[in-house]
Amino acid sequence: MRHTSQRGRHAVRGYWTDEWEKTEATLHKRDDTYYLHVAVKKDVAPSCDEESENGVVLGVDLNVDGYVAVTSTGAFLGNADHLNHRRNEYERRRGNLQQTGTRSAHLIIKGIGSRFARWSADSLHRVSKALVQEAVKNDCTAIAFENLKHIRDRISNASKFQQWAFRELQRHVEYKAEEYGIDVEDVAPAYTSQRCSHGECGFTHEDNRDGDEFECLKCGKELHSDYNAARNIGWRLVHHWLKSGAGRATSQLALKSGTLNANGRFRPTATALRG
Ligand SMILES: [Zn+2]
């Protein structure tokens, strides 16, 4: 590590507002603790051999509406609206039946309850399977989710059912990923929905996002909001590895058509080269 003086960026709310690659030292704030990142660009110039030993991350964004899960590689999985709709239907029918209060109504409630439980578990199972397949297909060594506490904070009106669904999904992904030797890690991604994930931009502003649409006010890049967030979540794990150990200095984020290493160097996949 080469130490250089930090340039007093702590007043900047989003800590990724500056171009990361050219930065020699940045001061990051998280939970009232400051982290100084020093001269990363100089230290991690990878050789090809080293790269294969290091991590490739699949970032995943989870949602209560639209798609259940969106990956940094551009896979849009599951239908959260349909899941919510079926849940509401089930609760409405249960409510009506409870009002009748008869024994047969009680039995019907049990029947539709277990049917809904099977159906929702199966939906989450399919999404988690597809997520792990996406990681395998892209040679990922790790899958990054935002941690559940952060999801609860971000989506303050998430129902108990939706929170259960996120827990279940992550749990399914964990045991399926283990079969392939893929790690599952949580990150606490402040500003992942506001930060521009395009190349070296990293501009962070709440007005970058408008519903499903992300348009960077600085570089003009337009992306689906959830896809942008997924890239930032994955990027956060790559960044975390950089801070925590030199052995992971050449880790990469899996993107739609290649990988981006910690130097901001993009490497297209073989498919992308052919295509
Ligand atoms: Zn941008």
Image: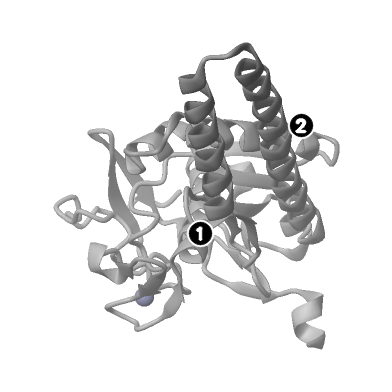
Residue 3 pos. (x, y %) = 35, 50
Residue 254 pos. (x, y %) = 65, 62
Write the residue at 50% across / 20% down: 100
Q: Which of 76 and 83 is in front in this view?
A: 83
Write the residue at 81% across / 77% down: 270
Among the two numbered marks 2 and 1 on one chain, the one whose residue lies closer to the N terminus = 1
Can see residue 149?
Answer: yes
Q: Which of 3 and 111 is in front in this view?
A: 111
Q: Quadrant of residue 209?
A: bottom left
Element marked by disc 2: helix
Classify 10 Å Cα crowding around label 2: few (below 14), some (14-19), many (20 and above).
some
Classify residue 117 as left or right of residue 206. Answer: right
Q: Quadrant of residue 156?
A: top left
Residue 52 pos. (x, y %) = 77, 56
- Where is 148 relative to 60, above or below? above
| Residue assigned mark 2 | 175
Q: Disc 2 marks which amino acid? A: Tyr
| Residue assigned mark 1 | 66
Q: Which of 34 and 74 is in front in this view?
A: 74
Ligand 1 placement by image quarter: bottom left
Classify residue 273 as left or right of residue 203. Answer: right
